Image (tube, rainbow, N blue to C red):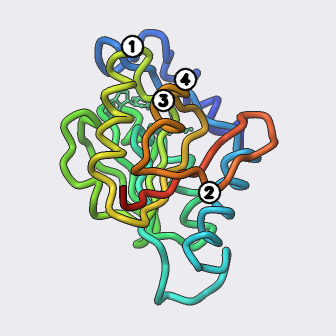
Amino acid sequence: MNSMFQATSHNTRPRQRAPAEGSYPFIPYRCEEAINLLEKAAMLFGYRPYSRMYHGRPSFLDIGCGAGNICLLANAVGMHANGLDLDEVMLKHGRKFVTTHNAHLFKANALTYRKYGDYDILYSWRPMADPELWEALQRRLIEEAKLEALIILPWWCEHIWPKDRRVRCVYRSKGWGMGRIYEKVKE
Ligand SMILES: C[S@@+](CC[C@H](N)C(=O)[O-])C[C@H]1O[C@@H](n2cnc3c(N)ncnc32)[C@H](O)[C@@H]1O
């Protein structure tokens, strides 16, 4: 699956396909690391991964979903998976992979999107290369996530998350990406 999505990325010549100034193009996160974080988040939410139970499924959003690799995995784990991205070409690729009624990929700008508070689980693997834009997105996630929402971050800023009392770290992976899961809590 890593190769399948890497091929999508190469086919669209990522360096030339950055969707906007300051953004990263589509670079797929490694499935092995992502699935570990997704399974852990489902369990923290109180949902047994791969269970067929429809009720109690967490709603999930990948912010900068590209070709939908993470949505595909989140859906396999049992989540209602949504993904947003600025790049219509990647979304078009993604809709070939992500075809179930429990998953939806749509066009939006992560920096202006207003519905982060609708989701139980948020995931973002640094859509922005520009450090100021990336920092602005992280601060918006902390501000706008609903209470008890889980925020999965394969990459985060140390000067933001560990220092903000509105979130607490509930999981640290030991694998290659050293991902973390934060929970939004009351101050
Ligand atoms: C590093 S890739 C992450 C891909 C996937 N989420 C993963 O973890 O494997 C970054 C993605 O963010 C998208 N992106 C960049 N800037 C964005 C923005 N302002 N709003 C929405 N998506 C953006 C890019 O088009 C690209 O698909």
Residue 123 in the image: x percent, y percent? Answer: 48, 48
| Residue in the foreground of this view, choosing between 86 and 9 | 86
In which quadrant is the N terminus drawn?
A: top right
> Mark 1 touching mark 3, by CB under 8 A?
no
Give the class, few, some or many, for how many residues have Cα within 10 Å of label 3's Cα (few <14, many ≥20).
many
Under mark 1, the amino acid is: Asp
Residue 48 in the image: x percent, y percent? Answer: 66, 80
Marks 1/2: CA distance?
Answer: 27 Å
Marks 1/3: CA distance?
Answer: 10 Å
Single out the mark in the foreground, 2 or 4.
Answer: 2
Q: Which residue is mark 3?
A: 126
Q: Which residue is mark 4?
A: 11
User: Is 41 placed above or below 56 here?
Assistant: above
Q: Secondary structure at mark 1?
A: loop
Q: Which residue is mark 2?
A: 170
> Mark 1 touching mark 2, by CB under 8 A?
no
> Mark 4 touching mark 1, by CB under 8 A?
no
Q: Which residue is mark 1?
A: 130
Residue 96 in the image: x percent, y percent? Answer: 47, 51
Confirm whether residue 95 shows in the render: no
Counting residues from the start of the chain, the first of labels 2 and 3 encountered is 3
Counting residues from the start of the chain, the first of labels 3 and 4 encountered is 4
Quarter holding residue 147: bottom left
Q: Which mark is residue 155?
A: none
Marks 4/1: CA distance?
Answer: 24 Å
Single out the mark in the foreground, 1 or 2.
Answer: 2
